[in-house]
Image (cartoon, rainbow, N blue to C red):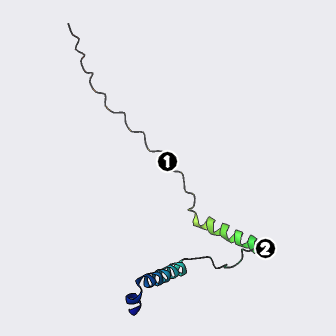
Amino acid sequence: MRLMNRNPLRAAALMGSLALILALTACNLPAGGTAAPSGAAAAQTAAAQTVEAVLATPSEQEPATQAPASPTPPSLPQTPVVQAP
């Protein structure tokens, strides 16, 4: 670590540069990849994706029956109203 003893500013700049380079190379930058399919290949891809989506959806089942109506709550006795004389 003689570099840090001689010039701490230069050492800090070097460490910062290395950290920046490491961070940039760790990012998932697009590398161009493959071109999107066109023509017949696009149609086949769309068809395959449609079949996959249809197979992934749950099958339709009988609609759930409505829950039985809850019984009416018991009626409470009326509260007597007291009027001032």
Q: Which residue is at 55% across, 57% downward?
A: 61
Q: Tell me the residue that label 1 is attached to.
A: 65
Q: Which quadrant of the figure has residue 55?
A: bottom right
* Left or right placement of residue 78 versus residue 23 in this view: left
- Percent x, y of residue 3: 41, 90
Which of the two residues, 52 or 69, is positioned nearer the viewer here?
A: 52
Direction right: furthest residue: 39
- Percent x, y of residue 68: 43, 42
Residue 19 lies, with reference to residue 46, above or below; the image says below
Q: Which residue is at 43% across, 85% downward?
A: 11
Q: Tell me the residue that label 2 is attached to.
A: 40
* Left or right placement of residue 66 versus residue 84 in this view: right
Report the amino acid beneath label 2. Ala
Report the amino acid beneath label 1. Thr
* Left or right placement of residue 16 versus residue 81 in this view: right
Say which element carries label 2: helix
Which of the two residues, 47 or 63, is positioned nearer the viewer here?
A: 47
Could you tell me which quadrant the N terminus lies in? bottom left
Residues packed near mark 2 inside 10 Å, few (<14), some (14 to 19) or many (20 plus): few
Residues packed near mark 1 inside 10 Å, few (<14), some (14 to 19) or many (20 plus): few
Which of the two residues, 58 or 14, is positioned nearer the viewer here?
A: 14
Whichever of labels 2 and 1 marks the residue nearer the N terminus, that label is: 2
Q: Which residue is at 74% across, 72% downward?
A: 42
Residue 30 lies, with reference to residue 55, above or below; the image says below
Which of the two residues, 32 or 43, is positioned nearer the viewer here?
A: 32
